[in-house]
Amino acid sequence: MHRRLVWMAGLTAMLLGPQASGAASLDGWIDLFNGRDLQGWHLKDASGPNGWVVQNGVYANKPPSTDIQTDADYYNFQLHVEFNIAFGSNSGVYLRDKYEAQIFDSYGKPLDLESCGALFARIAPAADATRPPDTWQTFDITFVGKRLTVRQNGILVLSNVDVGPMGTGRASGRPDAPGPLRLQGDHGKVSFRNVRIRPLTAAEAARLAQEMEGER
């Protein structure tokens, strides 16, 4: 290909951002939703009900249903998730299939271990960043080793917290072993869009670990 065409293709990729499901953009981000179907994902319970419907790039779940999880496993990464929780509903984003960033209609309620933005049942969010139900919200997550940072709607809610042991890694037996990303769909009505992940190299993980330590 002519060098000018290669340069133009690269510029187009940067302007468009993350590519189709499973393809990495120039800055390493992988769009996990292709906007059409559940390619790259599967039901956690293959025999369970499937209430997931994809329309206009939105992945909406209506009970009865079950969780979906990525075919691929991840360890150190940055993650962006946009979600919309219905009134009174409950969901979550499971990291490495073991650690749950809680999604819950906790708008206007006191902060506790089950509030939206909590490391579920372990660490309450440090600030109330939750919007009313039936509105779009965001999680921006950095997970390095056993250290987790979560920004909800741009507000720091978990700052370099130690997730501690929870469950056992399938292959290595380590509690912090790699695992799939899982979106909880067996509790209530929730929608997701623009879910993308950036796996980290060892050097990037070490640099981000230092930055996260400075935020504590």
Image (cartoon, helix red, strand yellow):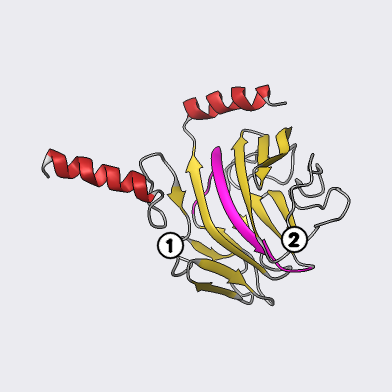
**In this view of the protein, which residue sits in the foreground, 52 or 83?**
83
Which stretch did the figure color magenta? 72-87
Q: Which residue is at the far right?
A: 110
Residue 96 seen in render: no
Q: Which residue in the protein does label 2 denote?
A: 132
Q: Which residue in the protein does label 1 denote?
A: 34
Return the x and y of residue 50 as percentages of the image width and height.
60, 75
The amino acid pointed to by label 2 is Pro
Q: Quadrant of residue 105?
A: bottom right
Q: Residue at x 60, y 24 (%)?
A: 211
- For discs 2 and 1, the disc positioned in front in the rendered view: 2
The answer for how far apart the CA atoms under marks 2 and 1 are is 27 Å
> In the image, is residue 163 above or below residue 115?
above
From the viewer's perspective, tell me whether residue 7 is left or right of residue 176: left
Q: Secondary structure at mark 2?
A: loop
Q: Is residue 18 magenta?
A: no
> In the image, is residue 207 above or below residue 127?
above
- Quadrant location of the N terminus? top left
